Image (spheres, helix red, strand yellow):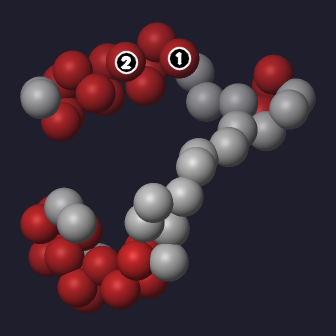
Amino acid sequence: MSHDLFDDFHNGREYERFAGRAITVPRAPGDQPDRELLEWHGAEVFRG
């Protein structure tokens, strides 16, 4: 579990139930996350 989740979200307990589960996206394209913004976030925020 990420230390950020642990620190920022009260030990990350509310996210433990999602560990190991697949992430799904909405079917409607307008409801899906922007791929370019996700790539930016991954490169600039998580930085490997």
Q: Please name the amino acid that badge 1 sits on.
A: Arg
Q: Which mark is residue 14?
A: none
Q: Residue at x 80, y 25 (%)?
A: 30
The C terminus lies in which quarter of the figure?
top left
Q: Residue at x 53, y 17 (%)?
A: 35
Residue 4 pos. (x, y %):
16, 63
Give the structural element (helix, strand or loop) at label 2. helix
Q: Is residue 44 above or below residue 36?
A: below
Image side of residue 37 versus residue 40, left or right = right
The N terminus lies in which quarter of the figure?
bottom left
Q: Residue at x 30, y 79 (%)?
A: 12
Q: Is residue 43 above or below residue 1?
A: above
- The outermost residue toward the top is 36
Q: Which mark is residue 35?
A: 1
Of 13 and 20, the residue lying toward us: 20
Of 45 and 1, the residue lying toward us: 1
Image side of residue 45 versus residue 21, left or right = left
Crowding near the residue tagged with mark 2, few <14, some 14–19, many ≥20 C-alpha atoms within 10 Å: few
Which residue was labeled with disc 2? 39
Give the structural element (helix, strand or loop) at label 1. helix
Crowding near the residue tagged with mark 1, few <14, some 14–19, many ≥20 C-alpha atoms within 10 Å: few
Q: Would you say the residues marked 1 and 2 are in contact, meaning their CB atoms lie under 8 Å apart?
A: yes
Q: Is residue 40 above or below residue 22?
A: above
Residue 2 pos. (x, y %):
19, 61
Q: Please name the amino acid that badge 2 sits on.
A: Glu
Quarter location, residue 14? bottom left
Q: Residue at x 43, y 25 (%)?
A: 38
State the CA–CA distance, disc 1 to disc 2. 6 Å
Residue 32 pos. (x, y %):
70, 30
Q: Is residue 26 above or below residue 47?
A: below
